[in-house]
Image (spheres, grey):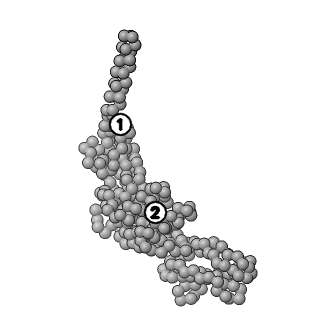
């Protein structure tokens, strides 16, 4: 009995010893994750944040050296603030983690998207500071994008401008129709803007002075209408003054008593901003459906 008792005590001592060792991890563990704000306050870490001249996507560079191996997190909803007030504040919409190797120069690209469509793009190599957004609507959007893992840069930028600049929800396009509808519905709740029938794909460009402009390139949408009798249907596009911008299409035969479901796609180039409409009509000239859209 004494021998068994001693063995049990030895095993117990070993067990407590293991717990004690595991409970005290070194502060430079490779598993350590700290936020960017925390990293900026650390004496053993040196960080420089600077813009790279882009207005969305990988638009911020973090130049960092550290005495220890760490992981730095970028919580969704962080703002990268330029030193000049006439330049864009950038939003980090998705949570991200970046590994920092010790005792070497680490250059890490961070995602940031413009939050004021009317301001200039941050200048290349311009210094940036970081804060957490206090805009509850931007935080809701960032949380949604993170939850749904939406990393489409064009849709992300368009969604941010919907929230901050009241851009049309039509400018938000995702190939995943379920996610696209969910995102548009969220934007409707946040902004009270209508969810239009169409999507307007846009191209964003920056001039040499940092001014940002958007140009619509494609109009997409689903068209449906009930057809009481068999007929041939065509469609055309007009501007707000009634001028034809797209000549009538070749007619399609639509059977009687069905709901026609058609896909509409229109490439536009050089069209002025304003209101347009696509009109579906019969071979007799009877208008079946008119859908308006903006460019």
Q: Is residue 158 left or right of residue 249?
A: left
Q: Circle 1 — which element?
A: loop
Graded by Cα atoms within 10 Å as few (under 14), some (14 to 19) or many (20 or more), the crowding at tag 1 reads few
Residue at horizontal 39%, vertical 11%? 1
Where residue 78 appears, as percent x and y from the top left, is 35, 57
Q: Under tag 2, what secondary structure?
A: helix
Q: Residue furthest front?
A: 1
In this rendering, would 124 be left or right of 184? left
* Identity of the residue drawn at 43% across and 73% down: 192
The answer to whether residue 12 is seen in the rendering is: yes
Picture residue at 62% right of the left edge, 75% below the top: 223
What label sits on residue 29 in the rendered view?
Answer: 1
Q: Quadrant of residue 51?
A: bottom left
* Quadrant of the rendered image containing residue 199: bottom right
Residue that numbered label 2 is attached to: 156
> In the rendering, at what x and y percent does residue 144 appear?
44, 59
Q: Residues within 10 Å of mark 2 (few under 14, many from 20)?
A: many
Whole-percent x, y for residue 167 in the image: 43, 73
230 relative to 8, above or below: below
């Amino acid at each position: 009995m004494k021998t068994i008792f001693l063995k049990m005590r030895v095993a117990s001592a070993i067990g407590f010893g293991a717990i004690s060792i595991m409970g005290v991890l070194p502060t430079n563990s490779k598993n350590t994750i700290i936020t960017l704000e925390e990293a900026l306050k650390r004496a053993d870490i040196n960080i420089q944040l600077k813009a790279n001249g882009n207005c969305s996507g990988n638009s911020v560079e973090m130049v960092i050296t550290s005495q220890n191996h760490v992981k730095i997190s970028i919580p969704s909803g962080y703002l990268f603030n330029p030193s000049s007030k006439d330049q864009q504040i950038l939003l980090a919409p998705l949570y991200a983690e970046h590994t920092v190797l010790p005792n070497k120069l680490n250059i890490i690209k961070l995602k940031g998207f413009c939050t004021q469509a009317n301001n200039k793009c941050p200048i290349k190599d311009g210094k940036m500071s970081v804060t957490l957004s206090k805009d509850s609507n931007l935080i809701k959007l960032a949380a949604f994008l993170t939850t749904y893992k939406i990393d489409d840069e064009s849709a992300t930028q368009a969604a941010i401008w919907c929230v901050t600049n009241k851009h049309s929800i039509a400018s938000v396009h995702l190939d995943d129709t379920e996610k696209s509808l969910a995102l548009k519905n969220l934007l409707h709740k946040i902004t009270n803007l209508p969810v239009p029938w169409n999507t307007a794909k846009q191209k964003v460009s920056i001039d040499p002075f940092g001014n940002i402009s958007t140009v619509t390139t494609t109009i997409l949408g689903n068209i449906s209408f009930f057809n009481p009798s068999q007929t041939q249907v065509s469609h055309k596009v007009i501007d707000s003054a009634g001028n034809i911008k797209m000549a009538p299409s070749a007619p399609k035969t639509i059977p009687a008593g069905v709901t026609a479901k058609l896909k509409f796609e229109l490439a536009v180039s050089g069209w002025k901003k304003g209101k347009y409409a696509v009109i579906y009509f019969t071979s007799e000239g009877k208008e079946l459906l008119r859908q308006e859209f903006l460019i």
